[in-house]
Image (tube, rainbow, N blue to C red):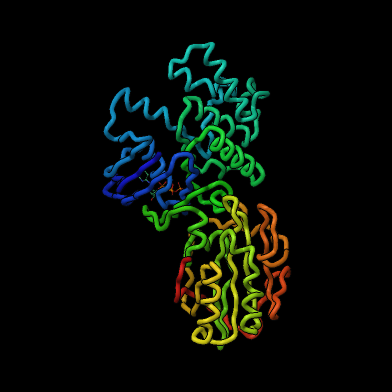
Amino acid sequence: MIQIEKLRKVYRGRGREVTAVDGVDLTVAEGEVFGVLGRSGAGKSTLLRCVNLLERPDEGRVVIDGRDLLALRGGALRRARQGIGMIHQHFGLLGSRTVAGNVAFPLEVMGVPRAERARRVAELLDLVGLAEHAKAYPARISGGQKQRVGIARALAGRPKVLLSDEATSALDPETTASILELLRDLNRRLGLTILLITHEMDVVKSICDSAAVMRDGRLTEQGPVTGLLARPGSELAGGLFPLPPAEIRDGYTLVEVTFVGGATDEPFVSALARKYSLDVNILGGAVETVGGERVGRLQLELPGDPSLNAAQIAFLREAGLAVTVKTPTPETPDPGVRPAGTSAAGTPAAEPPASGMPSAGRHAGETSAVGTSSAGTPTAGTPAPETPASRTGAVHDVQEDAR
Ligand SMILES: Nc1ncnc2c1ncn2[C@@H]1O[C@H](COP(=O)(O)OP(=O)(O)OP(=O)(O)O)[C@@H](O)[C@H]1O
């Protein structure tokens, strides 16, 4: 539905050049919710604004629903752009118009006759749950309601594509959740393709089928969210499942295990411990439901150097897990985005509820902290304390293997 090829946008002015988008290739399938995640200044807004030509790219192609936008002019371009709705962080409502008046505005511009306009506005307000507020003015409604008006207005021209520019960044967590739920609902009911930009990992986790990470104008990784989460070294996985600082003890092997879907049904840690008579130490981890699938990351410590644990690591990989063996390094990478479970101010959210092993059944949407244990049958449910007799130090991947 959306194809972006070799897109490049350079801002020039006052003897200065800023390459905001630097050769981006991106494909969003029809009916998909695709999130572009990145820190401030990464180029996300520019990328999004190039998709509906609010910014004209310097190079590259933007193809929406089979039409090459940069090749269109005049009426053809206007019609193509009507097929692309957009919502914004600060809503952009007209304060002098009622809720209904704001939604009617694009229909007036399109020349839709009055009676049909009234019908369509009523239908749109119903769709976003604002039928009772049709006559209210923006100053009298909440932020979440304002964004609902923005969404109704964006859908006025029956677009196939909706662009979302940090649509929930100005909202509190509860309202954010309700707006994300509405977007997901519209995506399913209308078959709407959604391309959103965000710096919030939780947004990607909640509604995105696929995602990309953007840094300095480039996409550093992209693909289906569950696939990225299972990829060792993925920034997305690191941001979604921030693990405590890893500490490698002499004579031990530290591994990170990522699992998606079915693998979580198998009690692989206890199976490993039993098969090799090992004391497996669970240093930290989390399990979440992403895109309807259970996904998680665990940090395990196995007795013995990595060279002595080859069979154990192979066992985990054969169980369908992505395994990364860690080794000391001076620095850990900075994902550059707000991790999941942190507030707008960047402070950690409340401790997730303690619960059992990831192999045990979990409820959708639940986050589970897995605490430290050091027995053949690992226990869980306690927050991971400082590991005694360990030395601090960042770690990096020496051995990577996606399933
Ligand atoms: N109109 C402009 N003129 C000049 N430079 C610009 C313009 N708009 C953006 N930039 C620069 O382009 C780069 C990318 O900005 P952009 O707004 O696209 O990033 P972003 O990831 O959306 O960040 P934010 O979330 O803070 O908006 C930044 O260095 C920014 O300063």
Q: In percent of the image, x 33 and y 28: which residue is there?
A: 77
Answer left or right for 186 relative to 400.
Answer: right
Q: Position of residue 361 (x, y in %)?
A: 70, 60
Answer left or right for 354 relative to 13.
Answer: right
| 360 is higher (above) or lower (below) than 157 | below
Q: In percent of the image, x 37 and y 29: which residue is there?
A: 80
Q: How many labels does the image show?
A: 0
Q: Answer whether residue 54 is visible to the viewer in this image.
A: no
Q: In percent of the image, x 53 and y 32: which residue is there?
A: 190
- Picture quarter with the N terminus: top left
Q: Where is residue 398 in the image (x, y as percent from the top left)?
A: 44, 76
Choose between 380 and 115: the one closer to the eye: 380
| 346 is higher (above) or lower (below) than 4 | below
Q: In percent of the image, x 62 and y 63: which residue is there?
A: 264
Q: Quadrant of residue 57?
A: top left
Q: Answer whether residue 358 is visible to the viewer in this image.
A: yes
Q: Quadrant of residue 81?
A: top left
Q: Position of residue 141 (x, y in %)?
A: 65, 30
Q: Position of residue 274 (x, y in %)?
A: 66, 80
| 259 is higher (above) or lower (below) than 325 | above
